[in-house]
């Protein structure tokens, strides 16, 4: 793939979770995204799924600090 190549979207999951939202949840202390991202956990790559699920659980438990 190079600059200018056409990209065709062949499917989109119904949950609407974007990679940018998963990244923001993980890297920018965004507890407001936890519920939304939780809806897409099953579609995450296996190696991401547990770490993102742990962040979602932490936010849902009320521990919002990234240092928790």
Image (tube, rainbow, N blue to C red):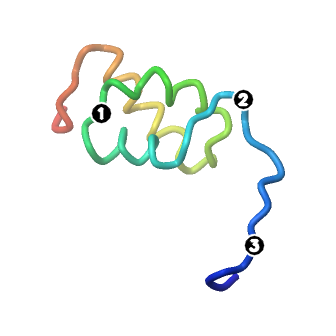
Residue 30 disc label: 1
Q: Nearer the viewer, residue 5 or 50?
A: 5
Q: CA distance from mark 3 to mark 2?
A: 24 Å
Circle 2 Cα neighbour tier, 10 Å, few/some/many (<14 / 14–19 / ≥20): few
Q: Contact (CB < 8 A) between labels 3 and 1?
A: no
* Residue at mark 2: 14
Task: Name the mark nearer the viewer: 3 or 1.
Answer: 3
* Quadrant housing the C terminus: top left
Give the mark, 1 or 2, whose residue is nearer the N terminus: 2
Q: Nearer the viewer, residue 20 or 41?
A: 20
What residue do we see at 66% from left, 81% from top? 4
Q: Nearer the viewer, residue 10 or 68?
A: 10
* Quadrant housing the N terminus: bottom right
* Residue at mark 3: 6
Decide: is 20 above or below 17: below
Task: Name the mark nearer the viewer: 3 or 2.
Answer: 3
On the picture, is 68 further left or further right than 7?
Answer: left
What residue do we see at 62% from left, 83% from top? 3
On the picture, is 36 further left or further right than 68?
Answer: right
Quick one: SS at disc 1? loop
Circle 3 Cα neighbour tier, 10 Å, few/some/many (<14 / 14–19 / ≥20): few
What residue do we see at 30% from left, 48% from top? 27
């Amino acid at each position: 793939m190079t600059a200018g190549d056409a990209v065709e979207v062949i499917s989109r999951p119904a949950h609407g979770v974007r990679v940018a939202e998963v990244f923001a949840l993980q890297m920018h202390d965004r507890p407001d995204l936890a519920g939304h991202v939780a809806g897409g956990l099953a579609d995450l790559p296996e190696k991401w799924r547990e770490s993102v699920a742990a962040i979602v659980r932490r936010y849902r438990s009320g521990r919002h600090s990234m240092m928790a």
